[in-house]
Amino acid sequence: MSEFEFITRITGRLSRTINHDGGPIVEGLVEIGPGDDAAVLRTPDGRVVASSDLLIEGRHFRRDWSGPYDIGRKAAAQNLADVVAMGGRPTALLVGFGVPADIDVAWAERLYDGLRDECAVVGAVVAGGDVVRAPVVTLGVTALGDLAGRAPLRRSGARPGDVVAVRGRLGYAAAGLDLLTRGVDGPAELIAAHRRPRPPYEAGEEAVRLGATALIDVSDGLIQDLGHIAAAGGVRIDVDSAALPVPAELGPDGLRFVLTGGEDHGFAGTFPSGTTLPPEWRAIGRVTAGAGVTLDGRPHELTAWDHFLD
Amino acid sequence: MSEFEFITRITGRLSRTINHDGGPIVEGLVEIGPGDDAAVLRTPDGRVVASSDLLIEGRHFRRDWSGPYDIGRKAAAQNLADVVAMGGRPTALLVGFGVPADIDVAWAERLYDGLRDECAVVGAVVAGGDVVRAPVVTLGVTALGDLAGRAPLRRSGARPGDVVAVRGRLGYAAAGLDLLTRGVDGPAELIAAHRRPRPPYEAGEEAVRLGATALIDVSDGLIQDLGHIAAAGGVRIDVDSAALPVPAELGPDGLRFVLTGGEDHGFAGTFPSGTTLPPEWRAIGRVTAGAGVTLDGRPHELTAWDHFLD
């Protein structure tokens, strides 16, 4: 199969999304989709939100632990969540796909089905990309989004007195990965959480409406990601361990997974004192003067989840 | 060195570009640069041009044949050229960087110097990205650009009777790669062309002004890329071999390199009959009714440069 046949097959999984009746509402934003030198997207806000991640087989996923459809959904989800964490609405993905020689076109088609379907959850589409040979499955994913006239929600706005709150699951994906790594049985929900995160995408616009001062998606682990908010804002964040949700199904290491596990792509934000939070948001701590992240007032020592050094 | 120290070091090479006095004119377009969940760029045209490529060590470059600075310039150039080929002005890059364990921070800094400096040629900046571990050096590069109110210049607009013309070098990068592959001496200019392409970025806006009906950057090889224009427009393109520039320094295989060599990132376009082309553009053929690409009226049989299957 030639490069062009292969590309035609996999982009064929996408074109129905772009051209289909009654499809995602942002389809009208794609002026030029896959097949030219570049995509052209309308940006009604006069700005574009843009975020890129690389996903490398053996580090971010394993083909024996996840199928192509879930890998596609996860690759899309983590990038869409970055746009949401800025308060943006995702509109499009560009996907660079590095293909080892042992990948067949059916596997690749399922990957693109997953990319397409995760985009559809938020009304976005895959608008372009690139296919090359690579030694391991490699995905270079860029998500674009629109702010709809809103100010971007940065990491840097937390102020002493703010409430720290989270929305979405914490620790599930890490607990699932731990089961797979140790090769032991456990709740299917945990394995599923590792394979396919379900970010609560509505959290971004909701945080904007609630007057959030900072927002981040929890991709490196709660403590580490709150550390980014603390550093960017020049503040300290104190987490109250009693307020953290540590469900029994996470097992005996549940608190560690909640504090240091990434990849569930929930959201952590800071809100002015006195904000009435809807029930989906759980208050877990407080912003104070100082630096760093503390747990019950003590500096936190657990090793953070670190994609880079692992 | 931790992930965050490493990232701080390499993004430190970029911040001077974004914040520097008298710097590139598009700096004002970057509302939020590296360091948050996503970048935010202003899009005064109300649209954004977006293109992604993956570059994989061993396939698109070799560390023993190219230094990090040249690899950075080349990775930026090939993506910036895609935006130019749509008639756009590049504004920003996002760079996902996959780092093997044997890469030191000084090597990575030089790579980012190269990305920064190639962007500066067109007044663009590196606005964001990602750093992860990878088995080989991996670059996932996304270029964004602005159309400044112009219609995008597609591959599909060629019409019978149009003149086919090229701007920029053809075959130099392929001839240089051939020297490196065979391990023989040859003109330094050819090796340099492989290591660091010099796309004539002004070709995009110039083609728009000249009324071009289609434009592409020559990345896969002249015949193959003209084939994309022919297929997208439902036309045939006939190339006149006597009109092709085949400089003596390309060696005895010069014509083959000119016809099938990619990676110089010159531009090929089609223009209405009677267009007065400036001297930088060389007319090399004609659009006719039919399909495919012919050389002097005969179907072209040379194997095209194919990144995917090689």
Image (spheres, coloured by chain):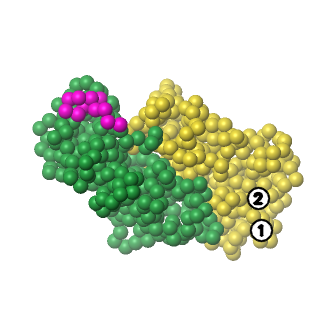
Chain colours: A green, B yellow
Please, what is the three-letter code of the amino acid marked with disc 2? Leu
Q: Nearer the viewer, residue B134 or A231?
A: B134
Q: Quadrant of the C terminus of chain B?
A: bottom right
Circle 1: residue type: His
Determine which residue is flagged by label 1.
Answer: B300
Residue ID at (80%, 39%): B188
**Crowd around label 2: few <14 · some 14–19 · many ≥20 (10 Å):** many
Q: Point out residue A302 in the picture as x, y percentages from the top left corner.
A: 32, 36
Image check: A181 left or right of A289? right
The numbered mark, 1 or 2, whose residue comes first in the sequence reads: 2
Q: Name, please, the residue furthest toward the bottom.
A: B290
Q: Residue at x 19, y 33 (%)?
A: A296
Instruction: Give the extent of the magenta segment.
Output: A292-303
Q: Compared with residue B57, is residue A121 higher up or lower down, i.e. above or below?
A: below
Q: Residue at x 14, y 51 (%)?
A: A279
Task: Using the rendered view, name the quadrant where residue A42 is placed.
Answer: bottom left
Q: Secondary structure at mark 2?
A: helix
* Chain to which mark 2 belongs: B
Q: Residue B32, image x and y in percent?
A: 39, 38
Q: Are marks 1 and 2 in contact (CB under 8 Å)?
A: yes
Q: Is residue A301 magenta?
A: yes
- Kindly identify which residue carries mark 2: B259
Can I make out residue A148 in this image? no
Q: Position of residue A162 (x, y in %)?
A: 19, 34
Q: CA distance from mark 1 to mark 2?
A: 10 Å
Tell whether B221 sits left or right of B29: right
